Image (cartoon, rainbow, N blue to C red):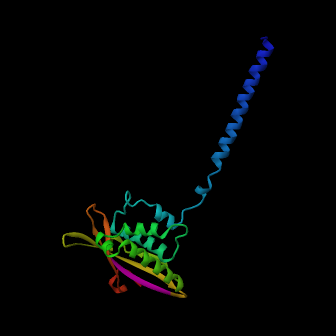
């Protein structure tokens, strides 16, 4: 093989390598700047609730538990499920409830009640506009029958048709065997019994 042919082959190989590097770099830049469609779309509130792992990251305080409960209740109450199934969001709510409360609300009955409430809310044009949980300093802690309990207040600003409503609730949470605060009871209370001002 003469020297001219060797030079032509070397130049050809170097040219192919350079061309491959240029094409590869172009593809790298193109892929780096274009995000998949899924990353551009933000998760809905129902999707955030559905994908939150309460088994690994359970809310640490009674206040945080009630805040999560309110987020879930608002999505269900307002029928903002989107593509998420009611059972998937409802299952997350049930993880925040005490075993004694779960016994009083078997799964089958629980979902029937939620479906009925959602239907009624839609017919009556009812929704939760916003909710608020009392400050940590307003939470009362007591020992009841040997259990650690916490009393938390929440406030709901709602709408029915063209009318607005204010509702106040008192939650009793109890620590379970894993030291997780679970909702044992909740009831409506007058505003005067809460730390919220008018």
Residue 17 locus on image (x, y percent):
70, 28
Quadrant hosting residue 193: bottom left
Residue 172 seen anywhere in this rendered image of the structure: no
19 is higher (above) or lower (below) than 125: above
Residue drawn 79% across and 19% down?
A: 8
Residue 55 seen anywhere in this rendered image of the structure: yes
> Which quadrant of the figure contains the C terminus?
bottom left
Q: Main secondary structure of the magenta part?
A: strand
Residue 70 locus on image (x, y percent):
42, 73
27 is higher (above) or lower (below) than 107: above
81 is higher (above) or lower (below) than 8: below
Residue drawn 78% across and 12% down?
A: 3
Q: Is residue 192 magenta?
A: no
> Which quadrant of the figure contains the N terminus?
top right
In this rendering, the count of numbered labels is: 0
Q: Nearer the viewer, residue 136 or 169?
A: 169
Residue farthest toward the front in the current orientation of the protein: 108
Residue drawn 70% across and 33% down?
A: 20
Residue 52 locus on image (x, y percent):
44, 61
What range of the chain is rendered magenta?
164-171
Residue farthest toward the right in the current orientation of the protein: 4
Residue 183 locus on image (x, y percent):
33, 72
Q: Nearer the viewer, residue 132 or 162?
A: 162
Residue farthest toward the left in the current orientation of the protein: 146
Residue farthest toward the top in the current orientation of the protein: 2
């Amino acid at each position: 093989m003469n020297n001219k042919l060797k030079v032509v082959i070397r130049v050809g190989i170097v040219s192919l390598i350079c061309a491959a590097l240029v094409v590869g770099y172009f593809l790298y830049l193109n892929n780096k700047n274009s995000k998949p469609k899924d990353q551009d779309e933000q998760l809905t509130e129902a999707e955030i609730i559905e994908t939150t792992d309460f088994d690994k990251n359970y809310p640490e305080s009674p206040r945080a538990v009630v805040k999560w409960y309110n987020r879930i209740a608002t999505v269900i109450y307002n029928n903002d499920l989107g593509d998420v199934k009611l059972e998937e969001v409802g299952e997350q709510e049930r993880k925040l409830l005490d075993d004694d409360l779960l016994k009083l609300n078997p799964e089958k009955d629980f979902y029937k009640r939620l479906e009925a409430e959602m239907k009624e809310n839609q017919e009556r044009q009812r929704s939760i506009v916003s909710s608020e949980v009392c400050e940590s300093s307003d939470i009362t802690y007591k020992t009841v029958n040997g259990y650690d309990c916490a009393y938390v207040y929440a406030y709901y600003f709602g709408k029915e048709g063209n009318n607005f409503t204010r509702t106040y609730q008192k939650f009793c949470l109890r620590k379970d065997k894993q030291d997780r605060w679970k909702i044992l009871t909740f009831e409506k209370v007058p505003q005067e019994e809460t730390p919220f001002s008018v």
